[in-house]
Image (tube, rainbow, N blue to C red):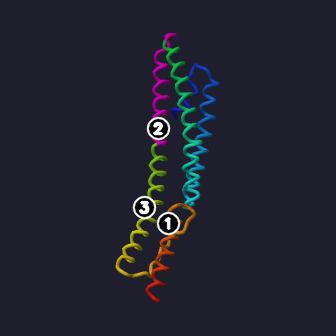
Amino acid sequence: ENADWFMECYHGDMTLVNQFHTQLQVTSEVTNKILEYLSTGSDRAKEQARRTFIDEFDPEVSKLEGILDQFSDQVTDLVDNNDYNSSMQTRNVLFIVGIIIVIVALILTVIMATILIRSVVEPVKQLQEAMKKMRQGNMDIEIGYKSEDELGRLSDDLRSVAAFLKAVVAD
């Protein structure tokens, strides 16, 4: 509804409106790409989502902010031309669009942070539990976490140490 009103009442540069619309679509596509990566749940996909967020999403949002600044400048020019009501309505719509973009970015940031934190905390808990068993003398540990990252290598090393100690104790 606001977008329709905006298209009808905006008296500024329509190429700017088209740029904004195109940039919004690009940002939406990057957002969908990040969400697809996150939906797989794999460590590699999470890393790709993090990289996409930093390398693609953040710059696209910055471009949107730049276009909104240009809109704001044009609205100020409209005010100077005595079209106050239209200018204020346009400014309000731009303010709402800006808030929506910030909210989407924050939501995506929270989702990314939550998933990344979980991907680190769960393996650490498994390693802590395995080490607790080893301290109690039980070398029959099971660490389900397998990955190519640092925690995966640490898990592999802990499995090796447990197997070595079990062999030493058995001899």
Q: Which mark is residue 154?
A: 1
At label 1, the amino acid type is Leu
The tag earlier along the polypeptide, 1 or 2, is 2
Q: Is residue 40 a member of the stretch shown in magenta?
A: no
Residue 103, placed above or below residue 73: below
Choose top left, top right, bottom left or bottom right for residue 118: bottom left
Between residue 136 and residue 30, name the one nearer to us: 136
At label 3, the amino acid type is Val
Between residue 92 and residue 52, name the one nearer to us: 52
Distance in Å between CA atoms under marks 1 and 3: 14 Å
Magenta region: 80-105
Q: Which residue is mark 2?
A: 102
Please name the residue shown 48% across and 60% down the image: 119
Q: Which residue is mark 3?
A: 121
Residue lying furthest top: 81
Q: Is residue 82 a member of the stretch shown in magenta?
A: yes
The tag earlier along the polypeptide, 3 or 2, is 2
Between residue 5 and residue 97, name the one nearer to us: 97
